[in-house]
Image: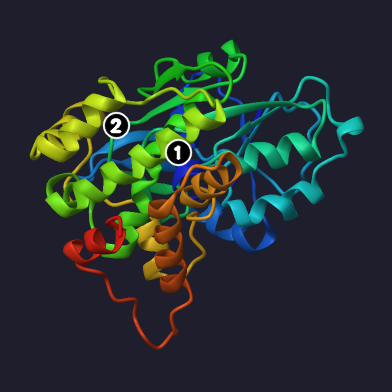
Amino acid sequence: MILTIGAGAVGTVLLGALGRHPAADLALYARPKDRAAFEAAPGVRVEDAQGRPVFTAPRPRLVDRLDLQGVDHLLLCVKHGALAPLLEQLPQPSAFPPGCTVVCTLNGVDALRMLRRQLPGVRILPMTIMFNAQWRGPLQAQLATKPALVLGGTGDAALAAAFQGSGMAVARARGDEAVWGKLLINLANAICAVTHATIQDLLTVPALREACAASIEEALAVLRAAGIAFEWPMPIPPSAYLALLRRGGPVTWWLARARNGVREGSYPSMVADIDQRRTTEVLLLNGEIARLGEATGVPTPVASRLVSMVQALEHSPAAQPPRPLPPEALAAALRPA
């Protein structure tokens, strides 16, 4: 059985894909306050940007207890802030079912660290989410890119097989390398959050492309200094991608559309987090690079500045809507003194 905790955009898309398997044995943890809404949903429906169905599946079995007996895979699809309270509800490592694998879908590497620290001896599998989606209601979501993910760790044939024939593209990576590679791309989320830019804006507006290139270039230097291996999620090397960002005009946008199916008007979830006054992942992404830079002696002015900018928006007065920064102003703020 696959038990999913968290039915936001990521959890809903995964439930939709997994539910297409004829032998799917799926369950969803439903808190009492959410159960009625889940029960009212006729099933799982994931649409594309035009409203056409991508995944449709029966509603998974709802459970209200975190009893892991019989659970082969525990999919964690919660926000980072909910992870620590959730871990308090799970069995102690000594009582964990021996055949249960915990699958972490959260962005960044801090969640993996927390899980491995709190659940020593339990098999933890990183699942890197390579799609962009928005939550549209209970068990309803909309994809803005092609559905794809990467399974890391030592691999998991059974979990990969559960997606077979669903339309979800599943790749494999060694260890945590795909997680670090996704983090490099996710550094741009802060740029979009500060400027309220779409992904198309990010990859077509010269000032935003330069900010994106500077952020990735700085992070690459940090990972090299720290000796951290990563799997670059683009079909061209990082150096070529940076060159395209800086001098290739809209080529990176064309690449994103062709390879990942990125749609016009799509944006990272950090933009919505700022709009809705939710805590963002900036400390887990750009903040991770800043902390690593401090530990390795590599300056990280771009990462540090973006963290400060996003946090300022997070803490802006409720009565005062966050004011986007013009792209040129952001580029000037990130430019070396």
Could you say which is closer to the camera, residue 172 or residue 210? 210
Q: Label 2 vs label 1: CA separation?
A: 19 Å
The residue at 44%/85% (across/down) is 317
The 10 Å Cα crowd at callout 2, few under 14, some 14 to 19, many 20 or more, is: many
Q: Which residue is mark 1?
A: 183
Quarter holding residue 328: bottom left
The residue at 44%/15% (across/down) is 164
Please tell me whether mark 2 sits on a helix, a strand or a loop: loop
Where is residue 47? Give x, y as percent. 30, 42
**Amino acid under disc 2:** Lys
Q: Which mark is in front, 2 or 1?
A: 1
Where is residue 2? Give x, y as percent. 63, 29
The residue at 38%/25% (across/down) is 232
Could you say which is closer to the camera, residue 233 or residue 15? 233
The 10 Å Cα crowd at callout 1, few under 14, some 14 to 19, many 20 or more, is: many
The residue at 77%/19% (across/down) is 99
Q: Which residue is mark 2?
A: 146
| Up/down of 141 relative to 16, above or below | below
Quarter holding residue 69: top right
Please tell me whether mark 1 sits on a helix, a strand or a loop: helix
